[in-house]
Structure formats: structure tokens, C-alpha cells
Image (tube, rainbow, N blue to C red):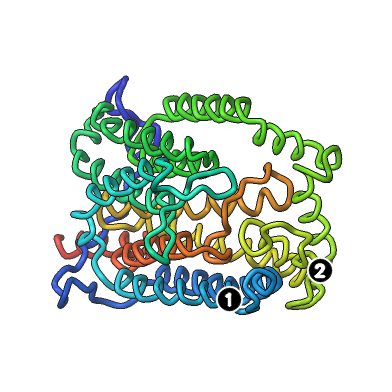
Amino acid sequence: MDTETRTKESGVRSPTPWPDAPTPTRGGPGGFVSGESTPVFVLLVATSATLLVLGLVMSFSASFVRSAAETGDAFGIFSRQLLWCAVGMVLIVPLALTDYHRWRRFAVPLLAVALIACAAVLVPEIGDLRNGARRWLSLGPVGLQPAEMTKLALALALSHLIARRWTRIRSGDLHALLMPALPLMVTAALLILVEPDLETAVLVLAIGGTVLYVAGLPGRILAVGVGGAFLGAAASIASSGFRRGRILAWLDPVSDASNFGYQQLQGFIALGSGGLFGVGLGRSRGKWNYVPNADTDFIYAIIGEELGFLGAFTVLLLFLGIAVGGTIAARSAPDPFGRLLAAALTAGLLVQAGFNMGSVVGLLPVTGVTLPLVSYGGSSLVFTMISLGLLLSIARSGQTPAAGRGASRARGRAGR
């Protein structure tokens, strides 16, 4: 069936049908998925684990100068990252081995909590003001970014709500597809935008748009939505002197080399210094207070400096591996909920990685988003690992398209 086939002239297009896949196994103790790991599961585990280990190594290398200057302990930032990694591991393993359907019941409540937290962070008495933005909630010694929770919660909630209306959507009911998905997307994006955090707001819209498109939203309507989001982003940039400065510095960083163009130029210097093989692990000069945010937003520049073009290209290949694994997991998922959720989670990871690496190499303005699994950051790391745990569960529950066709042919021969 062609992906642009429509069941009604004004309705949704027919989503690309997934292969004949088995009903997910739910009979194991505690809801754990039984059966062997699929090749896609192994691919996602290998790429994610490699990125995580690389992130731990590079977060120490990129942060020990700042950590020593701020706390007197070169291992301070790395120790916190190691702790958040341990928390993530405690969550990702059972998530990967448990039937992902068990978490559907929490989808809508989790989104409600995330939206409330996004609203609460804007209250001066509640949200922490850091670098001119209110993006953090302090929970005792722990800081939480509600926007990170919102990305995961929105992917879960939209996948759940659209899967519940799947029969109506397949019959061409555009209203069933867009309501309440579209209002939830816009609400989440606006709450994050006013923090202000334009880049994460765009990420939220990208996640929601992926769910809608995979569910059958016609390309022309999606194009209108992308155009509206672009105009909204342009208006947000025009209304902020800081954002205008970043755009102008992106177009010509040398014109404002001591201010808005400084980070971009220092990132270029670090990347260029690495050459093909790098200056050596731990030997970056850029992290010595030259490259701002060397362990967070611009850690990819330090990777390029210390590990060279080959190291930076390897990171790109690892995210490409996640893209391939996530796409196959979505196509081979056994039900609409799994397919939509896998697509949304994969899109969220890849768009964020693209924003980060694109800004470091100059393809995009400096965005301020972290590199998933690699950059320092507690909330980002933990919620990324939760997302990967769910994606791994979907990959473990599905099968490859070839296997699906083989099973279908076998049933056909048995019928004859």
C-alpha cells in the first residue's frame, strides 16, 4: 500500500503497514518479556553502551579543569555524572526487559505531572534562575529539568492516545488524530518556550510531529505545521536580543568574536586542532577555559580535538546506528502503540544529537542542547536512558520484516 493512499479525500493517509508480527509476550513473571534478543536489540545495546562509556570518559576529560576550579576536586563533576549513570542503569535494565505495554497506564499521568512541573518552574519562588532562564526545580540536593521529563512524557502520552483511536484514524478520521494530540503538543512547547528554551520547545514539537506523521498525518498538513513552527521560532528570535545575537554570530562569528561569536569560534579552533587522529585523550587545550560549556553543550568539540576527525565521525556513526535500530524497531513493532512510541523516542534522540553536533560544526546556530548519553547532565542522562530502555523493550518484542514475511508464508502453507 502506498504511504500516500488516503481512505478519505480529507482524511489521514494510510500509515505504512508494518509486517505481520506476533503479539508481545506478557506471560513472564513480573511482566518480563520472554524470548531471545533480536539483532535490532543487540545493535541498540551496542551503540548506546558505546556512547555511554565514551560519554563518561569524555565528561571527565572535558570537565576536570572546571571542576577543579569551582570545587577544588577534579573528579567532582565526573563523580556526579557517574552517580546519574548508575541511577540510569538501575532504570534502563528492567525497562528493557519488561513488556513496554505495562507503562501505558502511566502515560497520561506522567504528562500531567510534566506539564505542571513546567508551569511551576516559571514561578520565581519555585524555579531556579540560572543564566537568565528558569529551567530547573530544586528537589533538595537534586536538580530536575521538567523539559527533559516532558519530552519522554509527550512521546508516551501521544502514542497511547493515538493508539486508542487507531480504528477511527485508519478509517480517515483526522479529528481523532489531531485531538487532543495537537493541543498537548502546543501547550508543552509554549510552557518550555517561556522559560525561555526555544531549542527544547522545537524538540518537543519534533517528537509530537513524528508521532502524528507516523500515524498518518498528510504531508501537506505537516508542512503547514512546520511552517507555523518556523514562523513562531522566527518571532521568538526577533523578540530576543540574545537570540538575534546568536543568529548573527552564526552567520558571521568573526564579526562578534569577543561576544556571541566567541563560543562558535573557540569550538572551530578546538575541532581544527584535532586533525585526523586528535591531540590525544586528556590533552585538549580548549577545555582550559577557552571553549565555554566544554563538558555540556560543546563536548563534541572536545571529542574532535582529543580524538580527531575519526573520533568525531565515530560518534556520528554510533548515532546513525541508533537511527537504523530505532527505525527497524518501529517498523517491526507488534502494535500501533509500540510503533508510534519507538518512532517518537528515536526522533527525539536524533534531533537532539543533530542540534548539538550541528551547532558545534557550524551547520546550525549555537543551540545549548546537550549531546545525548555523552554530555554532562543529570536530568538529560537519566531521561535519555529511560527512553532507551523503552526503545529496547520494543525492539525485543518485535521481529525483523524478513522474519514477519517468513512467518506469514509459513502460516499460508500450513493453511493449504
Compute the Cα span from label 2 to label 1: 20 Å
Towards the viewer: 359 or 313? 359
**Residue, x 49% and y 25% (percent of image)?**
228
Q: Position of residue 414 (x, y in %)?
A: 16, 65
Q: Quick one: which residue is furthest to the top in this view?
A: 9
Camera-side residue: 293 or 170?
A: 293
Extreme-front residue of the structure: 125
Q: Which mark is residue 76?
A: 1
Q: Is residue 387 left or right of residue 52?
A: left
- Tell us which disc is closer to us: 2 or 1: 1
The amino acid sitting under disc 1 is Gly
Name the image quarter holding residue 63: bottom right
Compared with 133, 310 (above or below) is below
Query: Which residue: 81% across, 50% down?
Result: 265
Q: Position of residue 18 (x, y in %)?
A: 32, 51
- Looking at the rendering, in which quadrant would you find the N terminus? top left
Q: Which element type, helix, strand or loop, lies under badge 2?
A: loop
Residue 347 seen:
no
Screen quadrant of the C terminus: bottom left
What amino acid is found at the position of numbered circle 2 in the picture?
A: Arg
Q: Residue at x 52, y 39 (%)?
A: 196
In what element is the residue under mark 1? helix
The x, y position of residue 57, in whole percent, is 62, 77
Is residue 78 in view from this perspective?
yes
Q: Which residue is mark 2?
A: 285
Mark 2 or mark 1, which has the lower sequence index?
Answer: 1
Residue 231, quarter of picture: top right
